[in-house]
Amino acid sequence: MMMKTRDENKFSTSVHRKDTFSGVFTNYTAFMPEVYKKGLISTLLYRAYMINSSLIGMHKEVEKLKDIFRKNEYPASFIDNCILKFFNKMNERKVPVHTVPKMEVSLILPFMGTTSVSVRNNLVKSFRKIMPFCNIKVIFKTSNRLSSYFKYKDSFPKSLISGVVYKYTCAKCKLSYIGYTARYWEKRLEEHTHISSRTGKPLSGMQIFAPMQHTRKAEGRCGKVSRDDFEFIGGGGGRYLLQVKESLMIQKWNPELNGNITSVPLYLF
């Protein structure tokens, strides 16, 4: 963040950090290519170079960055070497070269230590010989990401899931039924069991679906329709896509209680 201060008849700028700034960056012991660690130091140095309007402010910021990186276990020699290369690069005279832009080619590879670095170097050399008009950019990724260890969002309640294809299996005779719903799953279970999820009391005046028709025809031999008799077998997409998925599942499992009735015709079967 940039901070502006007024000194007599002119403004000066410097890097400003919030009180909540923790100073935590990529640790030097992290399993990642060394060039990424050098790039981190170079990026923060460049930010300081562009923001600070005076050499004194730049010097203070460099000392601050050195202290931050030492706390992140960066060796002093490594930090000093990066700082030296940065300022040499910023102060060198750049000669403009006018060439035809090369085609950018990006390639993502898993990071496996020194082996990945060797593979990247060989790829760059091969591209220069075989396809000199291309500029290959190799990006390393690791499966051990921070997001794989922590959940940032709460789990979505199962009762509020909508747009699912489900299967009913009778606990006694094992006859099955496949259906779909675009509404909340909790609401669909109420329609099948005729039991309110809030009060636990019977509901009246509701449509009777195939599972309940089956238990009534069994005259008590199969018991009542239970929530435990239902399971998810698919979902996602709009209403028409749900109907297609339901029809495919009926075609695949041939549930007895559906009577081969599908939601939409499947012309390929």
Image (spheres, helix red, strand yellow):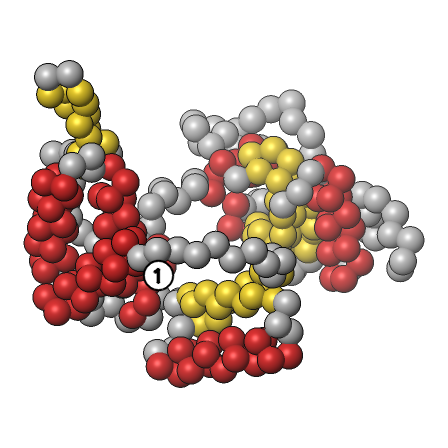
Query: From where the camera sits, is residue 205 visible?
Result: yes
User: Which one is nearer the viewer's eye here, 199 or 149?
Assistant: 149
> Can you give x and y, in whole percent of width and height, for residue 150 in the image?
30, 54
Q: Residue at x 9, y 58 (%)?
A: 71
> Can you give x and y, in whole percent of width and height, for residue 264 in the image?
84, 44
Q: Quadrant of the C terminus?
A: bottom right
The vertical placement of 16 against 26, above or below, is: above
Query: From where the camera sits, is residue 192 visible?
Result: no
The vertical placement of 201 against 225, above or below, is: above
> Can you give x and y, in whole percent of width and height, for residue 204 in the image?
60, 24
Q: Which of the 4 image quarters holds residue 33?
A: bottom left
**In the displayed structure, does residue 259 sit left or right of residue 152?**
right
Q: Which residue is mark 1?
A: 145
User: Which one is nearer the viewer's eye here, 222 or 3?
Assistant: 3
Q: Residue furthest right?
A: 267
User: Which one is nearer the viewer's eye here, 227 or 163?
Assistant: 163
Q: Quadrant of the N terminus?
A: top left
**In the displayed structure, does residue 60 sit left or right of residue 39?**
left
Q: Residue at x 33, y 46 (%)?
A: 152
**In the displayed structure, does residue 200 sit left or right of residue 209?**
left
User: Which one is nearer the viewer's eye here, 211 or 67?
Assistant: 67
Check disc 1 and report its element: helix, strand or loop.
loop
The vertical placement of 256 against 235, above or below, is: below
Q: Residue at x 51, y 57 (%)?
A: 97
> Can you give x and y, in whole percent of width and height, for residue 132 in the image?
62, 72
